[in-house]
Structures are given as C-alpha cells and as structure tokens.
Image: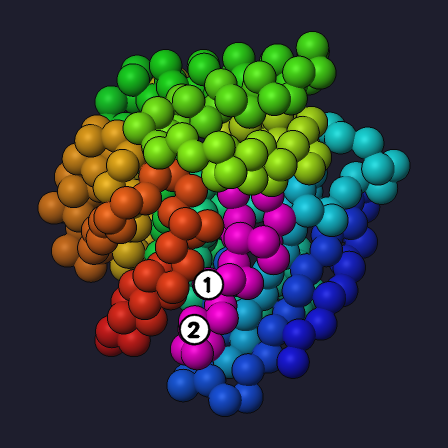
C-alpha cells in the first residue's frame, strides 16, 4: 500500500508518500530524504523495488523540491535547520519516534541535523545509511568551503541569469568531475535538476550557508557526527579520493560506522545502481 498526503505547516505544505509493506521482513520503519533539486519518489522508488526490510517507509519532499511548496508557490531561501524542523513536524504529526534513516546528499545533512535535534530531546538515535551526504565530502573545512563556493556560483547563475543549463553543468562539474559524460545521462541529469531550478539553487545555498557556519565553529560538524550511533557511508568509486579518505577517517574513529564503495558510480549513485544500493542497505540494516 502506498498513499500520498500533504501536511500544511504555516507557510509550507509538505508532500509525503507513506508506504506500507505487510510482507516486510521486519516491523521496522524508515525515513528517507532525497538530495537537492530532486523529489523523493524519483530518488528512492527504484531502490525500494529491491528492498523488503521495512514495514513502513516515509518519503517526504523537502521544501522547494518535488511537490513541497511555500503556500504562495514561490521559491524562497531555505536552511538546513528549517528543512530539518519541517521534517520533525511531519514525524510528530505521524507519531514516528523510532525509525531507521536513509539520506542522500542534501537529505543526508538534513537527516544528520534532524537526528542531532531528536537525540538531544529524547536520547534516541536512528541507525543511518548516508549516500554521499552533503558537508562530509572533505575533511579539511577550507577545502570543503572552496567546493561550496563553486556551488554558490552555480546557484547565482540559475537565480540571477536564468541559465539553468549552465548552472546545473557547473554544479555537476564540481560534484562529479570524473563522471562518465554520456550524452543521454547528462541530459537526464539536466532534466532532473531543472524541474524546479530556483528551489534547487536555494537548496545548494542552504548547504553552503551551513558549511560556512561550520568553518566558523569547527566543532559543530564533529558534534553532528557524534550524535549518530551507527551509520553506513556509501560513496561512488568515481567520486573524489578526498571524499572517500574522509569517510575512512570517520570510520576509523567510529567503530559502529562502516564505509562501502560502489564501483562505476559518482555522486549520482542512487540513480546509477539502485539494485546495488538496495543490497547494501539490506545487509546494513539487517545487522544487529
């Protein structure tokens, strides 16, 4: 069973899909959050075709993406804290207290912040799987901010010039410079991210703003990581070596964390190999 609903939260209306699988292997629940500029369904439904672990799966669209909007249907700036707070309100509305978490890119960072807030309030931390989460792609914060400035440039191109194709290309060349540039794949990525270009741009800015805050307060990122009991980090083999190196460094000091690398993938790994992602998720969440 799968149903789509909308939750009105002040100035924002969140669209979410709630999936019930009575044939699941467990009675556990899972929250999944997508990346910048893409909706939850297009990100996770292909993966869920190969998953049978959870009884309930919650797929919200973050504000500015998919079918979640400000009520006037205009695009506005968002922040990591505002996105996390809106998802927290959805969880409260649905009376979800204990659940697993899967987050991709922007959704990974929002989930980390959400987990931190909820852990501080209830001392209950979700078991996680993070697919190239935003803000963990470099150990060195100066290098991380340098990358984010390129994303800021991509955002400005989209919002100020209206050249969505150029802005998306700059983003892709920054986040996945070693990707295999097949014309069909490139066109598909462009189309996916251009669905709500200004929402995509504001999502990029939200991460850049958060990273700027971490540069000014370096302890904040470690506190975010340390609030997570156990997490699987999934990276693409074609992503930057420094990204995988930082994941390995995190795992070396967090014994309940693991790092898996998907061959032939870049930052678009959930779209490139959904079956393999599903296998990694199944193996990870079945572990006690």
Quick check: marks 2 and 1 in contact, CB under 8 Å? yes
Q: Quadrant of residue 94?
A: bottom right
Q: Judging from the image, what secondary structure is the residue with disc 2 in? A: loop
Q: Which residue is mark 2?
A: 51
Q: Is residue 208 visible?
A: no
Q: Residue furthest bottom?
A: 23
Residue 80 rendering spot, x and y as whole percentages: 54, 36
Instruction: Give the magenta-colored segment's residue range.
Output: 33-54
Q: Quadrant of residue 93?
A: bottom right
Residue 265 rendering spot, x and y as whole percentages: 32, 44
**Local crowd size for mark 1, using a 10 Å CA cut-off: few (<14), some (14–19), many (≥20):** many
User: How many discs appear?
Assistant: 2
Q: Which residue is mark 1?
A: 47
Q: Residue furthest right?
A: 72
Residue at point 66% right, 42% down? 65
Q: Judging from the image, what secondary structure is the residue with disc 1 in? A: helix
In the image, residue 26 sits, relative to residue 135, either above or below, namely: below
């Amino acid at each position: 069973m799968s149903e789509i609903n909308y939750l009105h939260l002040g100035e924002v209306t969140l669209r979410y899909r709630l999936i019930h699988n009575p044939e699941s292997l467990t009675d556990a629940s899972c929250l999944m959050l997508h990346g910048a500029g893409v909706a939850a369904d297009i990100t996770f439904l292909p993966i869920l075709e190969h998953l049978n672990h959870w009884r309930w799966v919650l797929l919200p669209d973050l504000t500015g993406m998919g079918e979640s909007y400000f009520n006037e249907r205009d695009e506005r700036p968002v922040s990591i804290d505002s996105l996390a707070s809106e998802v927290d309100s959805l969880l409260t509305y649905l009376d979800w207290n204990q659940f697993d978490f899967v987050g991709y890119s922007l959704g990974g960072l929002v989930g980390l912040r959400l987990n931190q807030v909820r852990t501080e309030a209830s001392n209950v931390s979700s078991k996680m799987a993070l697919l190239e989460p935003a803000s963990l792609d470099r150990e060195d914060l100066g290098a991380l901010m340098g990358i984010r400035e390129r994303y800021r440039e991509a955002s400005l191109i989209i919002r100020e010039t209206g050249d969505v194709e150029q802005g998306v290309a700059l983003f892709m060349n920054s986040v996945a410079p070693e990707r295999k540039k097949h014309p069909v794949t490139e066109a598909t990525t462009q189309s996916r991210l251009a669905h709500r270009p200004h929402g995509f741009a504001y999502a990029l800015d939200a991460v850049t703003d958060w990273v700027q805050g971490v540069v000014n307060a370096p302890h904040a990122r470690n506190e975010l990581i340390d609030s997570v009991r156990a997490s699987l980090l999934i990276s693409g083999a074609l992503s930057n070596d420094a990204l995988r190196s930082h994941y390995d460094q995190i795992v070396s000091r967090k014994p309940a964390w693991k790092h898996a690398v998907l061959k032939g993938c870049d930052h678009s790994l959930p779209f490139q190999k959904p079956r393999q992602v599903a296998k990694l998720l199944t193996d990870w969440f079945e572990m006690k």
